Image: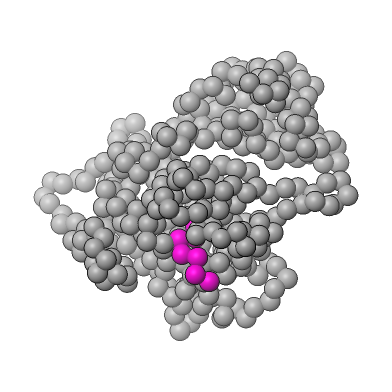
Amino acid sequence: MSVFEQSIASFLMPIEDLLEDDVVSEIIINGPEDIWIEQKGKLYKTKNIFPDETTLQAAIRNIAQFVGRKVDEENPTLDARLPDGSRIHAVMPPAARNGTTVAIRKFAKAADINMQKFVELGALSADAARFLAICVHIGKNVIVSGGTGSGKTTILNVIGAAIPPTQRIIIIEDATELKIQTPHVVYFETKAANDEGLGGLTIRNLIKSSMRLRPDRIVVGEVRSAEALDLITVMNTGHGGTMGTVHANTPKDALIRLETLATMGDTKIPIEALRQQISSAIHLVIQAKRYHDGSRKLSHISEVIGVDTNGTYSTRDLFKFVQKGKTKEGKILGQMEPCGVLPTFMQELEVNGYPAKRAQFARPVKKSGDDGQGEAA
């Protein structure tokens, strides 16, 4: 155990059991005596407490010290990563009126998550899973869209396993969360500037550096600023299979969000040209959604067709989750179904012998008495 791990174990002793519980996906601290956990998508209050506010603040300052950050009244926030890969964000008084407020997002072990598990949990159908695996394998550019806590990072981990093992992948994130299971992976992480404003590294810096390091694919954990334009440029310059995530509620909203982010930088580009670049760069948008029963699943797999005469992004759903009902306990019942249209690159799949059949895109035939019920993940 490293010094950092020993120190963390000591300062976070009041929540040690929560950190070690694999069923707990997130720990939320609203001051020393108000601690909640997320389990299977739902929040529950715990009996855990810190002795006092001073002890909780000491824990946050200890973490900040080990990751080279500074937290005080002038810099009351901390965004860092714990030794086990969990991500921690903290806001301290005076900004946090309830006392030091913390969210620790834990991640399931990569070995426990794969496409088959997604299918078993009802997060997507077997046909949709095969289609996604093929698309990632042949190098289609993919954006995973969704709200906070909808499972975007998990989806990226799962579909990333379909990348051919001979390819070199560069992953760029603010805090390392992705654990794509492929042999040749290089991880880059942004770096905050020091107190003098020097030494910082942004996602934009790292994308530009990555282009000189012979990547077969570049994966950006989360696109949240002007680096959207750099990512679109990478996609349009021969780096097939580039992937990233973005916060948005629908596939079309994801494209609009990327457009907005791409205009935040110094580089100015006509909006019509930018829309053409975005629509030609991105092949698929995978929409993640967290439902009211706490389940997370893929709600849409949509193909980007282009821009229509009105300058509006044109997408069409290839697969879509269809809710069939709910159990007495409030659990959503439903399944992902094909939407009855073929991808525009269907001939490419057939000519190259990939296991994609036209029948798997046909709308399901409704049978009498068939409720199509399948439990949500």
Q: How many marks?
A: 0
Which residue is painted at 50% across and 58% down in the image? 217
Residue at the image position 73 percent from the left and 35 percent from the top: 67
Residue extending farthest to the bottom is 309
Question: Is residue 97 visible in the rendered structure shown here?
Answer: no
Q: Is residue 232 left or right of residue 71?
A: left
Q: Which residues are magenta?
A: 237-243
Instruction: Using the rendered image of the protein, determine whether residue 9 is visible from the camera's viewpoint.
Output: yes
Q: Along the line of sight, which residue is nearer the eye, 372 or 184? A: 184
In the image, 55 versus 19, the foreground residue is 19
Residue at figure coordinates x 48%, y 29% from the top left:
39
Residue 58, position as x, y percentages in the image: 78, 24
Quadrant that contains the C terminus: top left
Q: Give the percent coordinates (x, y) of residue 173.
A: 61, 49
Q: Looking at the image, is 96 positioned above or below residue 12?
A: below
**Residue drawn at x 66%, y 60% as measured from the top left:** 209
Q: Can you give x and y, in whole percent of width and height, for residue 159 in the image? A: 41, 49
Colouring scheme, one of rainbow, by chain, secondary structure, one colour? one colour
- From the viewer's perspective, is residue 32 above or below residue 187? above
Describe residue 297's horizontal placement relative to residue 212 as left or right: left
Main SS category, magenta section: loop
Q: Quadrant of residue 82?
A: top right
Q: In the image as oriented, which residue stretches furthest toward the right?
A: 196
- Residue 236, given in percent of the width and then of the height, sits at 52, 71
Residue lying furthest left in this view?
Answer: 368
Q: Which picture quadrant has residue 14? A: top right
Check residue 240 for magenta coloring.
yes
Q: Is residue 21 magenta?
A: no
Q: Is residue 114 above or below residue 49?
A: below
| Image quadrant where one finds the N terminus | top right
Query: Picture quarter containing residue 4?
Result: top right
